[in-house]
Image (spheres, helix red, strand yellow):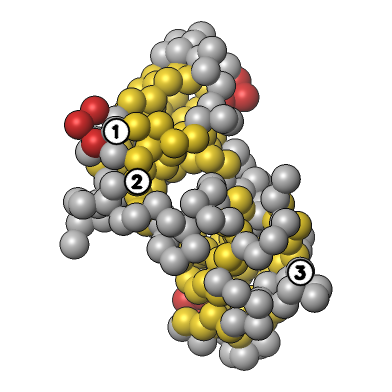
Amino acid sequence: EAGVAQSPRYKIIEKRQSVAFWCNPISGHATLYWYQQILGQGPKLLIQFQNNGVVDDSQLPKDRFSAERLKGVDSTLKIQPAKLEDSAVYLCASSLDGHLNTGELFFGEGSRLTVL
Amino acid sequence: GNSVTQMEGPVTLSEEAFLTINCTYTATGYPSLFWYVQYPGEGLQLLLKATKADDKGSNKGFEATYRKETTSFHLEKGSVQVSDSAVYFCALSQGAQKLVFGQGTRLTINP
């Protein structure tokens, strides 16, 4: 079974530029998550989708970050304009049912962003 | 809000040593508790979980017991191997709410 696919693996940009990350979840997984992991910290949820609807985006900096999940499958996360503090690894994860008490999240390898 | 605190790292041990990585949590009610592991060059993956008090999660020789009285979920392994070198994350969730992670503990096992 193919895992969660993310691209690009690495991206270096200058502040105020824009960047986009792509995620393809495991086939059949209804719930998709984007996490931000800053060096030395645990992952922090940015946004959660159930199919193509947003369940939780309370920690997404909406003035610069946006995300969409068209057709309830692939998802893109965009940052525009980027700031130095956006340097982090962006993790995509998916789960079958979104109920964390019983299920589990499957993570991609992440996209590492460096903002200069 | 909910939070997870892990012991400070990094942790370095010799092969076959006993491992404990401490994890305590703050939450209302009865969260589910998880340990995730990130091996070098790979994505986070679930190691073990416990969904109610006194449950013991186990996998690959690792164990953790859900202790509500001490709000803890410490990870243990009796004899570690070089292949256990990774970053370990304790996490919790309640209902369908988001997974909240600790800051991670880097473990290095020397042969």
Image label count: 3
Q: Report crowding for label 2: few under 14, some 14 to 19, many 20 or more residues within 10 A (C-alpha).
A: many
Question: Going 53% across and 27% down the picture, which residue do you hit?
Answer: A60
Q: Disc number at residue A31?
A: 2
Q: Is residue A111 left or right of residue B79?
A: left
**Which mark, residue A91?**
none
Where does the image place residue A75, in percent across and percent down from the top left?
Answer: 30, 32
Name the foreground residue: B55 vs A14: B55
- On screen, residue B43 versus residue B28, left or right, reads left
Label 2 secondary element: strand
Q: Report crowding for label 1: few under 14, some 14 to 19, many 20 or more residues within 10 A (C-alpha).
A: some
Q: Establish if A44 lies above or below A15.
A: below
Pointer 2 indicates a residue of which chain? A
Q: Horizontally, is A103 left or right of A8 in the view?
A: right
Q: Is residue A108 among what the camera can see?
A: no
Q: Residues within 10 Å of mark 3 (few under 14, many from 20)?
A: some
Observer-nearest residue: B111 or B93? B93
Q: Are marks 2 and 1 in contact (CB under 8 Å)?
A: no
Residue B107: x and y in percent read 62, 68
The structure residue drawn at horizontal position 54% and vertical position 48%, both measured from the top left corner, is: B97
- Quadrant of the rendered structure where residue A17 is? top left
Task: Estimate the x, y position of residue B59 in percent, counting from the top left.
Answer: 47, 81
Most extreme residue toward the right, as rendered? B70
Residue type at numbered disc 3: Thr
Q: Which amino acid type corresponds to the residue marked 1 in the rendered image?
A: Asn
Q: Amino acid at mark 2?
A: Thr
Q: Quadrant of residue B102?
A: bottom right
Q: Is residue B84 above or below residue A76?
A: below
Q: CA distance from mark 2 to mark 1?
A: 9 Å
To which residue does mark 1 refer?
A: A52
Identify the residue position indicated by label 3 in the image. B71
